[in-house]
Amino acid sequence: MSRLGPVITLAAGAVLALGLGVASTIATPAAEETAANTAAEAPPVEENTAAASPSPSQTAPKKIAKADYGGRVKGNGALIAISIRNGKAVGYFCDGRTEAWFKGSESDGRLQLKGVANAGSKVTAELGGGRAEGWVSVGGKRWDFTAPTVVKPSGLYRATAMVRGARLRAGWIVIKNPNGGYYQVGAAFAGEEQLDIPQLNSEQPTAPVTVDGTTVNPEDVDGFIEEMQ
């Protein structure tokens, strides 16, 4: 019996060592697998490669699609008419003796026109509240005006033709009279010669008229605004 004790003890120790070795062998791969899975599950670090957001573009200026204005020039007695189509604008100043055609543009409610025959002539106006309010300069003189919006047959009309080898041009402004009917003023020239100008039919301003023996067909502004530009 005294000899079996050490043998049993050694055997038990060997078994215990073997068991610990096996447990260690099993535990090590499991720990490595867990670490690997943890690394795989961790989200990758993202680099900030996004470009800076561009600044918002400036809003395009607003342009009036369609508007017509007409009124008297203060301190002169002349009439002025202005028409706008999609930001393009034309104007006409006339007192029956002196006339001036203008062209230019409108943007964000501000009108800027220059003389067609004389670039020194100008029209500047602010648009809003159903009217155009500003000033007109012709022949070195300047006058203020306020021109309310108008509807046909009020507005601006023009006719052109060739007369004895000279280009005839005629312009009219038609404005509704608050007391009834219509008031109009116009001028006609063949080259530099001023001609007598007939009155338009207020109810049908585009009806043919005769200027210096020549029949002409007046057009409303939609018929010539693009040509003038």
Image (cartoon, rainbow, N blue to C red):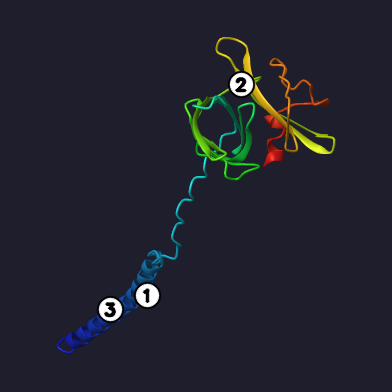
Numbered badge on residue 20? 3
Q: Amino acid at mark 1?
A: Pro
Snapshot quadrant of residue 173: top right
Q: How many angstroms separate mark 2 from mark 1 (CA)?
A: 92 Å
Neighbours of disc 1 within 10 Å: few (<14), some (14-19), many (20+): few
Q: Which mark is residue 8?
A: none
Return the residue nearer the eye: 206 or 137: 137
* Residue shown at 37% from the left, 75% from the top: 29
Measured as percent of width and height from the top left, residue 184 is found at 64, 20
Going by the numbered disc 2, the residue's amino acid type is: Val
Q: Which residue is mark 2?
A: 151
Q: Which residue is mark 1?
A: 29
- Mark 1 or 3: the one toward you: 1
Q: Residue furthest right?
A: 164
Mark 3 and mark 2: Cα distance apart in space? 106 Å
Residue 154 % position (x, y): 63, 21
Q: Looking at the figure, which quarter contains the N terminus?
A: bottom left
Query: Which is more toward the observer, 3 or 118?
Result: 118
Is 205 above or below relative to 191? above
Residue 151 higher or lower than 126, as above or below: above
Q: Earlier in the sequence, mark 2 or mark 1?
A: 1
What element does badge 2 sit on? loop
Residue drawn 35% across and 71% down?
Answer: 35
Residue 80 in view: yes
Task: Tell me, yes or no, whether the two marked residues, 1 and 3, touch with CB atoms within 8 Å.
Answer: no
Which quadrant of the rendered structure holds the C terminus?
A: top right
Q: Name the secondary structure under disc 3.
A: helix
